[in-house]
Image (cartoon, rainbow, N blue to C red):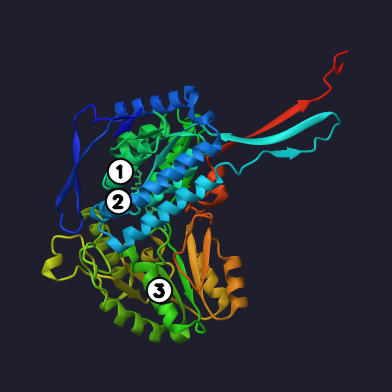
Amino acid sequence: MFINGEWVEARSGQTRDIINPYNQAVIAKATEGQVADMQEAIAAARHAFDHGPWPQTPATDRGKIVQTIADFIQRDKAELAELESLDTGKTLEESRGDMDDITAVFRYYAELADKDGAETLDPPIANATSRVVREPVGVCGQITPWNYPLLQASWKLAPALVAGNTLIMKPSEITPLSSVKVFELMEEAGVPRGVVNLVLGSGNTVGAELSAHQDVDLISFTGGIETGKRIMQAASSNMKNIALELGGKNPNIVFADADFETAVDQAMNAVFFHAGQVCSAGTRLIVEESIHDALVKELVERVRKIKLGDGFDETTQMGPLISAEHLNKVRRYVETGRKEGATVAVGGERPDDPELNDGFFYLPTVLTDCTTDMDVVQEEGFGPVITVETFSSEDEAVKLANDSIYGLSGGVFTNDIGKAERCVKKMRMGTVWINEVNFYFPQAPWGGYKQSGIGRELGKVGLEEYTETKHIYQNLKPGPVNWFG
Ligand SMILES: NC(=O)c1ccc[n+]([C@@H]2O[C@H](COP(=O)([O-])OP(=O)(O)OC[C@H]3O[C@@H](n4cnc5c(N)ncnc54)[C@H](O)[C@@H]3O)[C@@H](O)[C@H]2O)c1
Ligand SMILES: C[N+](C)(C)CC=O
């Protein structure tokens, strides 16, 4: 762990085995922080914010350091990508792509660092000035999930740093390796002592302490909805600013006039990429009735050909699930679907290839005959499972798409641009794609409607999350007002 500029072990001496989900090999022993370690890290971040140089450092200089971090991530891209694939099981090609995305995020915020000039207002009385400035929020707690360990971390680290905050990051306890490496890079880049702190350990101990602690001013969390609710409750103890990036159950509407090839190909990308362990996975395929049979037939044929395997094998297209616990959750999820009346068109079990026996693999699965009242259509399974529903009118398609407690993202495939625009206008989601799925980039805000979260990451708004707004008013001709005579 990295606390107050030093690399330290947990005081308790406890460790946790980090497991490769492809073969269950122990790839590292991570130190397992406890509440006392977290308290020490929070004290360091508090001291660095209240008394250290970082919040007063010119924004241009903070931007230069964040730019250097980006340079180091590119320099060490191959090592970082390998750590990410070892930890998560995702393919190396995907991890390399993640590292480029992460670099782009650091560069984007580095360049934005000194662009936020104050806003001048024209006050409603003479002889006065008025301006609005943005200042750092203070000490930020940042909690990240296991599916995109470093990508989700970058969305929090880069804006927090350029805005002049200090922070404590708690990565998922099962995928800490790439975060450890990036803290080494931040140290090398010259981030001052105490500004960035890394505490490893479980959510119920160190995560809960970070969310509830009185010296933390903001908590930014990416993860599941139930954890998000707990964090929101804990954060209320001192009215922390909160940003929550939670789950999704994302619809993908395919109209009969869509380009068939593209729609089938993208329906697969939407849900089988990273074995469906993506918050914005297009898990609910909503297909116009007239093309349902043809589309399902094509989908099933292609799904059968997806090559499962080791993320380090360049021919692998889909890796394992993250853990035995998660594999069991996905199995139970599909069983629920079966009991509810869904038909397993393909998949629905573990692969029988003996080479995949030790990994947490589950076959890519298509469930047909689904209706919106089924749990399998409403709950986030977070695995390689797609449900198929049908519609016969534009209104019905939108109604089905919106029938969810979630509102993270959604897609529409059609060649009729008017129809596409009418649909996306009515879709209650933070990101909607037309003839595309799962595309994100640093300039575009990301976040959820409804129970998919609060606040936005990325874009200018993702930087604003890490600032407080201050209004400064000056009377240029002070004198008594004689209100009280
Ligand atoms: N909206 C997004 O951008 C986005 C991105 C990635 C993942 N996700 C969501 O993340 C979920 C999968 O990730 P996960 O299984 O790691 O989520 P999770 O909620 O189980 O854990 C996320 C993090 O929270 C910590 N945590 C657990 N209990 C805690 C507590 N009581 N207090 C504080 N911290 C606690 C965990 O240790 C981990 O670091 C999915 O629901 C997925 O949709 C959302
Ligand atoms: C936000 N995203 C799509 C990068 C990862 C979600 O799990």
Which one is closest to the eye, mark 2 or mark 3? 2
- Whether residue 384 can be seen here: yes
Secondary structure of the residue carrying numbered label 2: helix
Mark 2 → mark 3, Cα distance in angstroms:
29 Å
Q: Are marks 1 and 2 in contact (CB under 8 Å)?
A: yes
Mark 1 → mark 2, Cα distance in angstroms:
7 Å
Q: Which residue is mark 3?
A: 267
Which one is closest to the eye, mark 3 or mark 1? 1
Per the rendering, the mark at residue 181 is 1
Secondary structure of the residue carrying numbered label 3: helix
Residue 124: x and y, percent? 83, 35
Between discs 2 and 3, the one toward the N terminus: 2
Q: For disc 3, does the CB lie below 8 Å from ligand 2?
A: no
Between discs 3 and 1, the one toward the N terminus: 1
Mark 3 → mark 1, Cα distance in angstroms:
35 Å
Q: Is residue 177 above or below residue 343?
A: above
Secondary structure of the residue carrying numbered label 1: helix
Q: Residue at x 62, y 42 (%)?
A: 116
Q: Which residue is mark 2?
A: 80
Q: Residue at x 50, y 84 (%)?
A: 256
